[in-house]
Amino acid sequence: MVSPLAVVGPGVTLGNGVAIGPGAVVLGPAVVEDGVWIGPGAQIGAPPEMSNLRQNTAWTGDLEHAGVRIGAGAVIRENVVIHQGSYRETTVGARSWILARAYIAHDVLIGEDATVSAGVSIGGHCIIGDRVNIGMNAAVHQRRIIGPGAMIGMGTPLSRDVPPYGKAFGSPARLRGLNVIGMERFAISSAEIELLLQRYTAGDLLLEESLSLHDDSPLTADLAWWHAKPGRRPLHAGFGER
């Protein structure tokens, strides 16, 4: 299912059932896991866009840099650009969708079941949690962290971090609410949704004091993920702002 008009370079490992469209380029080192769909014109595996690193020619077998990994079942749409990692694999998690013309810079980690909409740009070293949804043409500054289940509005310039399940939009971006529908779909109770909303409304976006959660709450792992990330710089809360 690899088009004869696609380029798959040395050092690329393809899983079972991978589809690669015409005009797409996949350069090594790269791992494309089972069932991945890569659309026409996608460009995966160019060297990191960093002036202090050598611009290697991976198409000749010059496989410097840390590589790219596309998780099982991910969809990479037309003309997406994903750069090699400089010290870790640039990663798209399983079942995530990267839509047309999105740009994923070096060393970015995107979790599972995420959606990166058309025209989004994500700067280097960013960490994007599971089930995140980033709206069309948003721009994420390098080294930013977006917590699991968060939603970023289309066209948003994001220069601060977004806590789990936050909804951020505007310029400058502010935390405007919770992704309640996403939380309900993930079987988070209404009581826990209300508790998290109260903490965010009060401006406690670092969640420095623990929440009283049920032992089996799926929210527990997401908050542990957020607390484990050093140097968090959350955006400001803008509840009630217009």
Image (spheres, helix red, strand yellow):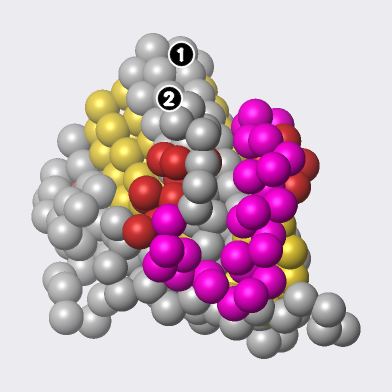
Few, some or many residues within 10 Å of mark 2 (<14, 14–19, 20+): many
Residue 233 position within the rendered picture, expressed as x and y whole percent measured from the top left? 43, 78
Residue 137 seen anywhere in this rendered image of the structure:
no
Asked if the magenta segment contains residue 206, the reply would be yes
Relative placement, left or right, of 1 versus 7 is right
The residue that appears at 14% across and 44% down in the rendered structure is 61
Q: Residue at x 28, y 68 (%)?
A: 230
Per the image, the residue denoted by label 2 is 72
Give the CA separation, mark 1 to mark 2: 10 Å
Please name the residue shown 30% across and 45% down the image: 68
Residue at x 68% of width, y 71% of height: 201
Query: In the picture provided, is 76 more to the left or to the right than 26?
Result: right
Asked if residue 232 lies left or right of residue 183, the reply is: left
- Quadrant where the C terminus sits is bottom right
Magenta segment = 185-210
Image: 228 above or below 182: below
Q: Which residue is at the front of the view, 108 or 19?
A: 108
**Residue 190: x, y in percent?**
73, 40
Q: Which residue is mark 1?
A: 17
Q: Earlier in the sequence, mark 1 or mark 2?
A: 1
**Amino acid type, mark 1:** Gly
Asked whether residue 161 is drawn in magenta, I would say: no
| Secondary structure at numbered mark 2 | loop
**Which residue is at the front of the view, 169 or 79?**
169
**What is the three-letter code of the residue carrying label 2?**
Ala
Q: Which one is nearer the viewer's eye here, 215 or 176?
A: 215
Residue 240 in sight: yes
**Badge 1 density bin: few <14, some 14–19, many ≥20, Cα 10 Å:** some
Rendered view: 139 above or below 194: below
